[in-house]
Image: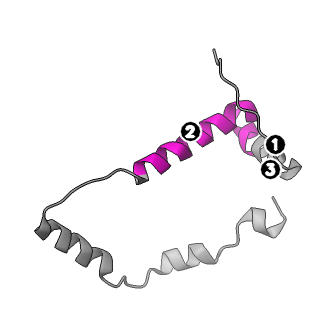
Amino acid sequence: MRDASIDLRVLPEQRDLFDHAANPMGKNRTDLVPEVARERAKARVADQVFFSVNENRLWLFTELLDAPQGANRGLERLMAVKPLWDTGKG
C-alpha cells in the first residue's frame, strides 16, 4: 500500500495527456505518473554515475567521442517527423 503522497498541479492538457497515455495500458494517471517519473529519475541517476579509467583508455574514449559521425539517414528521417503533440492531432 502506498503511504506517501505527492500533490501535483498540472495544466489540463498535461492531465489529459497522462490519461491518454495510461488508458491503453489499462492504467489511470495515478498509476502512470509515479511509474514514469520513477523510470525517468532512475535514468537521471544513472547519468550521474562516476566511472574511472586509466590514461590509455581515457585517450581512446575521448578519441571515440570526438570522432566525426557519418550520415545516418534513418535518424535524419526520424528527426524530421513532427511529433503528434506538436501537430495538434494528439
The answer for how far apart the CA atoms under marks 1 and 3 are is 10 Å
Q: Residue furthest top?
A: 1
Q: Which residues are magenta?
A: 21-46
Q: Secondary structure at mark 2?
A: helix
Task: Please state the horizontal and vertical placement of residue 15, each as a whole percent of the image.
Answer: 82, 44
Q: Describe residue 47's horizontal placement relative to residue 81 as left or right.
A: left
52 horizontally vs 38: left or right:
left
Q: Is residue 58 left or right of residue 79?
A: left
Marks 1 and 3, the one that precedes in the sequence: 1
| Residue 47 spot, x, y in % from top left | 42, 54
The crowd level at tag 2 (other Cα within 10 Å; few <14, some 14-19, many 20+) is few
- What element does badge 3 sit on? helix
Q: Kindly identify which numbered label has been placed on residue 9.
A: 1
Q: Would you say 35 lies left or right of 84 here?
A: left
Q: Is residue 79 magenta?
A: no
Task: Farthest residue to the right: give it.
Answer: 12
Quarter residue 83 falls in: bottom right
Q: Which mark is residue 14?
A: 3
Q: Nearer the viewer, residue 14 or 4?
A: 4
Residue 60's place in the image compared with 37, above or below, is below
Give the distance between the C-alpha atoms of the residues marked 2 and 1, in whole angstroms. Answer: 18 Å
Regarding residue 28, the answer to whether it shows in the image is no
Q: SS class of the residue under badge 1? A: loop
Q: Can you tell which quarter of the image residue 71 is in? A: bottom left
- The residue wearing badge 2 is 38
